[in-house]
Amino acid sequence: MNPSFWEGKTVFLTGHTGFKGGWIAHWLHELGAAVHGYSLQPPTHSNFFAATQLQRRLARSTIADIRDLNSLTSAVKQAKPGIIIHMAAQPLVRESYNTPVETFATNVMATVNVLEAARNVGTCKAIVNITTDKCYENKEWPWSYRENDRLGGHDPYSASKACAEIVTSAYRRSFLADANIHLASARAGNVIGGGDWASDRLIPDFLRSLDAGETLTIRSPNAIRPWQHVLEPLSGYLLLAEKLYTEGSAFSEAWNFGPNDDDAKPVSWIVDQLCAHSPGTSWQVENAKQSQEAGLLKLDSSKARAHLGWAPRWNLETALHSTIAWYQAWRDKKDVAAVTSAQIRAYTGS
């Protein structure tokens, strides 16, 4: 990634009040970009957006719903971005069973809205649409999924993200390629890092049980996931956006940004590591009937390695250490915006 590329660039970012959106907004600001955020209010009481006082570093923060096409289009036209990064979503599998209509509306039709607004603004050259590793039709096979594997999804969340991939392909071929707007989708693994307080996420759930003095309850201890620090896929998104902007259609495809195979670990391994950092803590398996979720999921990032020059920098142990350190700084009431910047510098080696 060329840091000087971002100096002075205008970026329209959806989902900037979320966990991943907050981290990439902070990073873009550090790189000198003018970030126009568009999102709902932060989804949890404690959140990265408030903890880091991120609003102070944005060119503009619009609190609104991406399902509102008129509002979204107005915000995009006002920002006049050269680059759009679409991260806003309903991101939780179990929540998608409770709110399937909202999940499909947010993850599918709102993606249509973003792409429709982008093609009408007249300034946009590059769009990165963030989907998920769960967009693949999961076969529970032992090898990693590649970008040309079949899309699908049993649960509403996974299915909605597979739909978003199809929408992305349709808009690219029907409208955006002819308008010289270069659009790619990005699929990442299970991200961890400081500032995530979402429900049904392993590390936030662990921290909540720790604060309450309760035993952590786990749904699927044997489920294997491609764990990675949040900075790993974000570095891929930024590199991809740069390539789309500077080199164009050759990069207008789907891309995986996953960890090394050694870092695809079962949930129980992660929890054991967390408990080792907090003596006296323990975990148990939830007895209630569970909604269906993938048992084995890994990503093949060979394409990003070969054609983008992207590769993971931190192993899982480093990712966990950095995550725990961020939360400890927050508990100690330290400047977590400064901690975030320091972790970005440690990751990039700058």
Image (cartoon, rainbow, N blue to C red):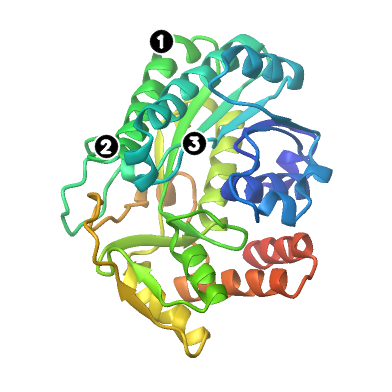
Q: Position of residue 160 (x, y in %)?
A: 35, 31
Q: Amino acid at mark 1?
A: Ser
Q: Secondary structure at mark 2?
A: loop
Q: Secondary structure at mark 1?
A: helix
Mark 3 vs mark 1: give the one in front. 3
List the residue tagged with mark 3: 89
Q: Position of residue 319 (x, y in %)?
A: 52, 69
> Of residues 257 and 189, which is closer to you in this image?
189
List the residue tagged with mark 2: 148
* Label 2 vs 3, first from the N-terminus: 3
Spatial CA span between label 2 and label 1: 20 Å
Q: Are marks 2 and 3 in contact (CB under 8 Å)?
A: no
> Of residues 37 and 292, which is closer to you in this image?
292
* Label 2 vs 1, first from the N-terminus: 2
> Of residues 207 and 75, which is closer to you in this image?
207
* Residue 176 visible somewhere in the drawing: yes
* Residue 262 visible somewhere in the drawing: no
Q: Is residue 81 left or right of residue 286?
A: right
Q: Amino acid at mark 3?
A: Ala
> Of residues 31 and 278, which is closer to you in this image?
278
Q: Position of residue 141 (x, y in %)?
A: 15, 55
- Placement of the C terminus among the 4 image quadrants: bottom right
Q: Is residue 95 above or below residue 346?
A: above
